[in-house]
Every structure is written in structure tokens, then in C-alpha cells.
Image: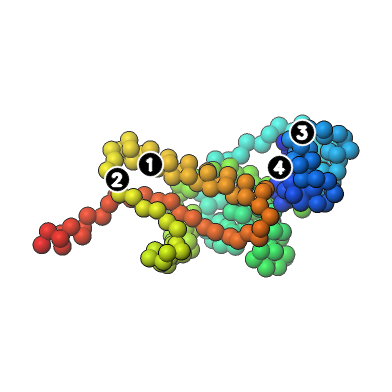
Amino acid sequence: MLAALKRHLKTAGWTAATIAQKLQIGEATAKRWLAGKALTIDRLTALADLCDLSLSELVRETERPAARLARELTLAQERALMADEFMALMFFTILSGYPPEETAADFELPISMVEGALVRLERLALIDRLSGGRVRALVDRTVVWRKAPMRQLFETRMKAQFMAIDFAAPETPYASEVVKLSPQGAAALAELIEEYRRRVQLLAEHDRETSHLPASWYTMLAVMRPLDLSGLERLRG
């Protein structure tokens, strides 16, 4: 039950610091409660109240078989997201663990617009809507986009952001490397890219839970390709 409660607290944006402030306890005490230490029924109830949950709702959720998250989207789901960029934005932020109301506030979006996207996402079986206005993704966060629609969406909407980067600017953080790899080595490098993505997700979670500073939205890209040797023709003369 504690694991379920912690998921709800995280989805609602609660951290040990904000819990401590709301419940007028020390941050160290809040961390102990979240670790299951000295957690009485009254304290568990107080934490659940932060998410507008009752203990009975938590118990029922714990008793339900855990839903298996989809590891990839259907072609129809990807096509629907590609056709509606705003719905895609809402899906990606929910998939990353951010509640819709936080996204709406960050991007100054009208609630009616957000609600419309949530209705469509639920119909597509991409999210589940819970009590208290909460939502959860029905797709694993480590989903790999292998089908054409989502790759095309990245090509048309996200690629330009990276191509516009001034790599000569000293404030631009990036890393590049040229290596010679066997097919096995290239496959291992592709897996390293996926591992890097997972580590970025963990970093975002940790920062959300521990930082007291204002946060901004970032996008990152990790990619590999065969080296283009066409420029050697000019050098050869």
C-alpha cells in the first residue's frame, strides 16, 4: 500500500520537502514516513489526504492485480498521436510522470483544452483516469518508438530544434565521438543510448523529488549513425 501511495504522491508533485511544509513536520520525518518508518494509520491517512485519497481506495488499488503496461503502441495509437500534436504533448508529459494540471500551468494551457486531450487519450487506451482528477499512463515509460508515425512526428516537429543548435556556442553542452565498431559493437552502442535515456529519466525523477529551485523544460537527443566519408573525396584531390 505504501508503494501505491508513493506513486500517487509523486504523480501529484509532492516531495519530502513539500509534504513536510504542508503537514508541519521536519523534512527528515517526512522522508522516514515515505520509507515506511514510524508510519501509523493516522500518518498514512494524512499522506493519502494530500492526494485526495482514502485508505479504502488505497487498499482496493493494492488488492487489484497490477495492470501490465504496454511496451509499445499500436499503429493506430501512433497515428492518432501524430495527427494531434497537442494530445501527443500531453501523453509524453503524463508518461514522464507529470500531472496534467502541472503541464497546463507550465504552458499556460486552458483547462478545457487539456480535458479534451485527456478524453481522447483515454479512448485510445493510453491513459487511465483515476479519482480526484489523477491520471496514469498505460504504457511503459521505456517504450521504444519503432513504428513510422512517431518517428515521422519527431522528424517534422523535434528535429529542427536540434538542427538549430549553435554547437560553436560555449554554453551549448554536447558530446561527440568517432569510433570504429563491429556489428556487435554498434548494437551495444545502440543499447547504451537506451540506457542513457533511462538514466535521464531517473535524473529527472531525483531532481523533482529533491530540488527546491524552479524547474524548466528541456529536451535531449542521443543518436548514432555511420560516418559520412564523402568529404574525403575533396581531400584526396
Evaluate whether residue 53 shows in this view.
no
* Mark nearer the N terminus (3 vs 4): 4
The residue lying furthest to the right in this view is 42
**Viewer-side residue, 53 vs 36:** 36
**Viewer-side residue, 231 vs 58:** 231
* Mark nearer the N terminus (1 vs 3): 3
What residue is rendered at 21% in x and 60% in y?
231
Label 1 near label 2: C-beta < 8 Å? Answer: yes
Dot 2 lies on which element? loop
Taking 87 as reference, is 198 left or right?
Answer: left
Provide the residue designation for mark 2: 179
Q: Which mark is residue 7?
A: 4
Label 1 or label 3, whichever lies nearer to me, is 3
Res 213 → quadrant = bottom right
What residue is rendered at 26% in x and 55% in y?
228
Q: Give the Cα separation between the discs numbered 2 and 3.
A: 48 Å
